[in-house]
Image (cartoon, rainbow, N blue to C red):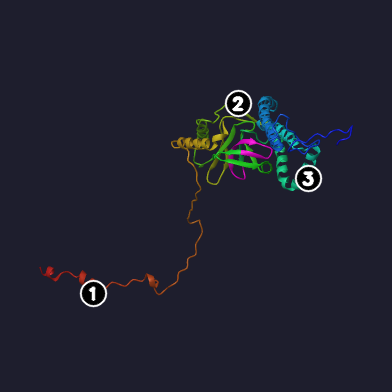
Amino acid sequence: MPQAGTPTPTPTPPGSTGGAGTGLQPPPWLPELVPTAFYRLFAAAIVIVVAYYVSSLARQILGRRIARRFRRPSVTRTILRGIQGAIIIFAGFIALTFFGFQASDLVISLSVFSAVLGFILAPIIGSVINGLFVLSERPYEVGDMIHLSDKDTYGFVEDVTLRYTKIFTLDNTFLIVPNGSMRERDVVNFSAEDSRTRLKLDVLVTYESDIAEARELIEQAARDVDNVIGGGPDIRIGGARYPAAPTCYIDTFADHGVNLRLRYWAIEPYKLLTVRSKVQTKLWELLEDADVEIAYPHQHLFFDETSGEMQVAMRETDGPPEHLRREPPDASVDADESAPDSDATTD
């Protein structure tokens, strides 16, 4: 029987361990048949689901503001992913407190977990760091057309995350490349600042051709093709300016002809092979009736009295080799066949 002045202990609800910091307790109105563990699990799931929808709502509300602030899709997507992840992680910590976990316990658990899995997570952490460098250096952006020189792959940047770059190739396939690998290879960006791309075409004509006419026809072949800039203001590249119209120059006087180099600008980098093929096809049509001949490697050999002397030695043999010998025809047969018919002579 409790003594006077001694507080009466409060009975512990079924399924609870009792004491402070033991986790979330079910409300008094909840039937005792519902286990406490089930109630905590249900409450944690509700928190996670609510956090997910809150993160999606935050992405919609802050998406346009962040996009206007940074004006880069890759950075905008990374920041929005970070906000969503932070909200969900914070909700996860709240859900863990329902099961009795304290902040100090979580810190100790994370420290031990990081120490054990640090070696395993090192490549992922390195990839994330490389992703930060890619986002800060801006070698390419979402929507840019790039070329991976080592793989000879053309494609469009579909997404840039902290761990990898997703490329949608022109072969209608996806290519996932870690950011660490992207920083180590040569990446050609066709649409970073200006989508116009300059192409060149070498045409070797004979020395007997009309060089002036050849240059005019080559320039005309490029101007007559769609998606080729036919003229206009000069195009600035760095501190230099180059003509926008197609230009043809004499490159070199080669062994077999005169090499003419055509330079022209394509409007879009998406169909460079198509544009190049159309220019060459048009040039082939224009050169058919012109006083211009395409040169090709050839050699001429001349022999005359000034070319020198060639020493020739002959030796006697017993006749042709065995495999070249032929039996002589039968003399009697030839005589009979060649003799006139006696009857015919008597007539």
**Residue that badge 1 annotates:** 332
In the picture, the quarter occupied by the N terminus is top right
Q: Do we see residue 271 in this rendering?
A: yes
Across and down, in percent, residue 81 comes to: 68, 33
- Mark 3 is surrounded, within 10 Å at the Cα level, by few (under 14), some (14 to 19) or many (20 or more) other residues, namely few
**Residue that badge 3 annotates:** 112
Task: Please say if 257 is above or below 136.
Answer: below
Q: Do we see residue 137 in this rendering?
A: no
Q: Which residues are magenta?
A: 148-166
- Element marked by disc 2: loop
- Element marked by disc 3: helix
Residue at the extreme front? 1
Q: Which mark is residue 137?
A: none
Dots 1, 2 in contact, CB < 8 A: no
Q: Nearer the N terminus, badge 1 or badge 2?
A: 2
What's under tag 3, amino acid-wise? Val
Q: CA distance from mark 2 to mark 3?
A: 65 Å
Residue at the extreme left? 347
Across and down, in percent, residue 120 comes to: 72, 47
Let me know if residue 154 is in the magenta part: yes
- Element marked by disc 1: helix
**Which one is nearer the viewer's eye here, 33 or 184?**
33
Q: Nearer the viewer, mark 2 or mark 3?
A: 3
Q: Quadrant of residue 194?
A: top right
**Which one is nearer the viewer's eye here, 284 or 186?**
186
Q: Main secondary structure of the magenta part?
A: strand
Q: Nearer the N terminus, badge 1 or badge 3?
A: 3
**Residue that badge 2 annotates:** 233
Let me know if residue 22 is in the magenta part: no
Q: Nearer the viewer, mark 1 or mark 3?
A: 3
